[in-house]
Image (spheres, rainbow, N blue to C red):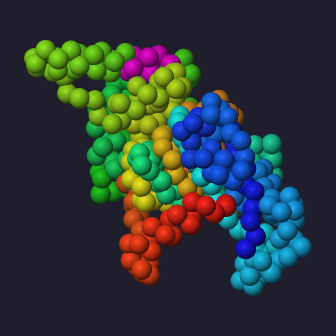
């Protein structure tokens, strides 16, 4: 077995070291941590943006694989050469990540060729995220079923203001049994490219309206009088996102997307060109070895809105939540399971 030193990324959306699983893993590998610094991601792989290193020699993992390709096995070597085809991460999310997608292979090659400063490699980036717990891992993922999206258009006038009346009318006229991807593309693109001043005004009015409703509901609840209906999960997240990214178009974009809440051990697979944004919690990810991200909202980083809107699949529906199955009981039953967990805690990455 080749023991590795793996390294953290300190993005501002990460959990502080005192609460972060990423920081805990870094510390368990013999490193000091800053309990107040955000620890966002732990990378395990050979990607040049944050390569793991052999623990004893300090040599980059990719250099080890070049010198000892037999470590990859014959199948991997025959298909990918001396490259590790996947990247494994642990994420500790304290603040929403960007509204984003990842390119397929052909699009990744094109974007890398045109904009290497924003797309550092030629690889696609399909990925799977598995919740660690104990708190749920929450994310925006994929476009809502059409009836729910249409209800948002009917009940949120601030959304209509940015989508436009004619475009919204075409989405509202869609039959859930028909192919509505063209109307969805038009509606989502209209929203994401709406003028910033219009977006800011719409978000401000929406947040003010929901804040008043929340205050009224809380007041009525304490006085036992008739109260406003409680905020929906989408409405609750609008208020949270407005504090994290004031007046951002991604706040309104969340009304187009499903909210997933994954319990520990549950997972979701994210194909290329599907919109998503991690919101809160901790997970492990496995993906193709790439760092290509097309962003369009909820971020201070470069936004490539036209690339995102042009290349999404516009599939509609709730993504499948994957749940693992125990195939073989550990030898020794429950006692053996506890033994395995204790040994794992003492191991290295």
Q: Is residue 33 left or right of residue 169?
A: right
Query: How many labels sit on residues?
Result: 0
**Quarter of the figure with residue 195:** top right
Q: Is residue 260 magenta?
A: no
Q: Is residue 179 left or right of residue 218?
A: right
Q: Residue furthest bottom?
A: 74
Q: Which residue shows up at 34% across the image and 30% down it?
A: 235
Q: x and y percent of residue 95 in the render?
A: 53, 34
Q: Residue furthest left?
A: 225
Q: Is residue 99 above or below residue 311?
A: above
Q: Which residue shows up at 62% across the image and 34% down it?
A: 35
Q: x and y percent of residue 180 in the render?
A: 39, 51
Q: Which residue shows up at 33% across the image and 57% down it?
A: 178
Q: Quadrant of the N terminus?
A: bottom right
Q: x and y percent of residue 48 in the render?
A: 80, 54
Q: Is residue 204 magenta?
A: yes
The majority secondary structure of the magenta stretch comes to helix
**Quarter of the figure with residue 226:** top left
Q: Quadrant of the C terminus?
A: bottom right
Looking at the image, can residue 229 be seen? Answer: yes
| Magenta region, residue range | 199-207
Q: Which residue shows up at 83% across the image and 77% down it?
A: 69
| Foreground pick, 326 / 188 | 326
| Foreground pick, 82 / 107 | 82
Q: x and y percent of residue 31 in the render?
A: 72, 46
Looking at the image, can residue 124 be seen? Answer: no
Q: Is residue 272 above or below residue 309?
A: below
Q: Residue furthest right?
A: 67
Q: Is residue 95 left or right of residue 233?
A: right
């Amino acid at each position: 077995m080749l023991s590795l030193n793996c390294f953290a990324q300190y993005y501002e959306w990460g959990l502080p070291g005192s609460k972060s699983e990423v920081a805990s893993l870094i510390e368990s590998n013999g490193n000091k941590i800053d309990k107040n610094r955000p620890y966002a991601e732990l990378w395990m792989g050979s990607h040049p943006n944050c390569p793991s290193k052999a623990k004893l020699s300090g040599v980059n993992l990719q250099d080890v694989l070049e010198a000892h390709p037999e470590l990859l096995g014959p199948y991997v070597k025959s298909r990918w050469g001396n490259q590790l085809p996947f990247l494994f991460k642990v994420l500790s999310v304290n603040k929403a990540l960007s509204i984003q997608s990842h390119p397929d292979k052909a699009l990744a090659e094109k974007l890398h060729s045109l904009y290497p400063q924003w797309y550092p490699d030629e690889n696609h980036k399909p990925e799977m995220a598995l919740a660690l717990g104990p708190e749920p891992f929450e994310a925006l993922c994929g476009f809502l079923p059409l009836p729910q999206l249409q209800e948002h258009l009917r009940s949120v006038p601030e959304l209509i203001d940015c989508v436009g009346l004619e475009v919204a009318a075409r989405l509202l006229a869609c039959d859930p049994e028909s192919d509505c991807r063209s109307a969805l593309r038009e509606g989502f693109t209209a929203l994401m490219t709406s003028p910033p001043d219009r977006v800011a005004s719409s978000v401000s009015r929406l947040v003010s309206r929901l804040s008043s409703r929340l205050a009224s509901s809380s007041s009525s609840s304490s006085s036992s009088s008739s109260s406003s209906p409680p905020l929906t999960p989408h409405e609750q997240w609008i208020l949270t996102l407005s504090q994290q990214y004031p007046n951002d178009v991604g706040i309104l974009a969340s009304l187009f997307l499903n909210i997933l809440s994954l319990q520990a051990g549950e997972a979701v697979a994210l194909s290329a060109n599907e919109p998503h944004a991690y919101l809160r919690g901790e997970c492990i990810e496995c993906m193709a070895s790439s760092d290509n991200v097309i962003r369009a909202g909820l971020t201070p980083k470069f936004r490539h809105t036209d690339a995102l809107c042009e290349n999404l699949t516009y599939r509609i529906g709730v993504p499948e939540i994957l749940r693992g199955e125990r195939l073989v009981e550990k030898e020794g039953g429950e006692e053996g399971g506890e033994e395995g967990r204790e040994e794992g805690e003492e191991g290295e990455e």
